[in-house]
Image (tube, rainbow, N blue to C red):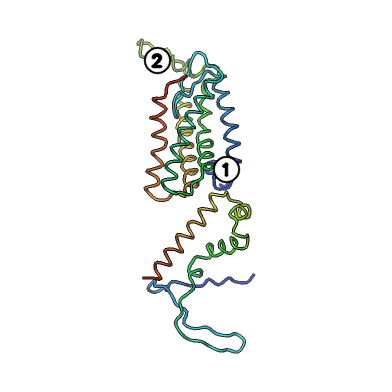
Amino acid sequence: MPILKKLPIICPSCEASLKVSSLSCTKCDTLISGSYDLPIFLKLDQEEQDFILSFVLSGGSLKAMAKQMDRSYPTVRNKLDNIIDNLNKLKQDEKV
Amino acid sequence: MKKFKSWINPFERSSASQLIILGIVFYVLGSLSAYLFNVRFDNFLHIAVVEQVELWQPFLDNLIILACLFVLLFVLGKSINSKTRGIDILSTALIGYAPFYLMSLSNINDYSSKATHELLSITESTAMNISTFSIIYLIILSIASILILVWIIALLYNGFKTAANAKGVKSIVLFVLAPVATVIITLFTPLF
């Protein structure tokens, strides 16, 4: 089973948000250096990212999500509301 | 563990419509049981053993209690989260209150009535006229009542939390208001 590498988004030393400083091409070894912000979606934890992915793939239907997750409709809606809250906080943090 | 969780928080997995149907079944069975064992649900989380009960009376008693609980939880739920749905609050009220119907079974064969009379007779005379059976019965009944009360609070809280996405101290304080207000309102509602 392949190991799922978790993308670190917080500095383990000072707990500040990490930035992307280099991108490389695995085909020709081209390396791009710079300072890029992580997309807001990647700042969510893995479970939240998976939820958003499933939500989009299910056509944005909370009912379908509830069936898929074997959870009740309000439980799934609460999960989505919590993610929206998190995204709004992250957006505000970015502005600061 | 999963099974235990579904006993105290069925709202996480089961749909509101399933829970409402189950709640209505419990409501009918609980009211019928109160009729059979001469019990009135005279206010929220309180029963009274009476001489005779008409079939419609326990149904109306429980309907008034459930209506109060529903309205209060719904208003509080909406004040916390505008997305709160009535259907989820209805399932919370119906399922949350359901364990209390078990209390009507306490008067099977008039046990509760007899034991209470024996207990009250102690205050009237100096002699101990209470049987060992009645003492044991009352102790078991007290423990069962406490467990049922805890179960009801857990069910109501979990249902409310799921329906209104309630979080934090403010939500807990608002939630506590619903059962307390239901007790006060039903205390002043006349028995029909």
Q: Which chain carries label 1?
A: B
Looking at the picture, tell me which residue is in the foreground, A49 or B102. A49
Residue type, label 1: Ala
Looking at the picture, tell me which residue is in the foreground, A86 or B132. A86
Q: In which quarter of the image is residue B190?
A: top left
Label 1, secondary structure: give it. Answer: helix
Q: Which of marks 2 and 1 is nearer the N terminus?
A: 1
Label 2, secondary structure: give it. Answer: helix
Find disc 1 in the rendering and name its residue. B16
**Residue B56 coordinates in the image, percent (x, y):** 55, 20
Left or right: where B23 falls relative to B138: right
Looking at the picture, tell me which residue is in the foreground, B25 or B135. B25
Q: Residue furthest front?
A: B82
Find disc 2 in the rendering and name its residue. B120
The residue positioned 51% from the left and 18% from the top of the image is: B111
Q: Which residue lies furthest to the right in this view?
A: A1
- Mark 1 and mark 2 in contact (Cβ < 8 Å)? no
How far apart in space, not on screen, are marks 2 and 1 (Cα)?
Answer: 44 Å
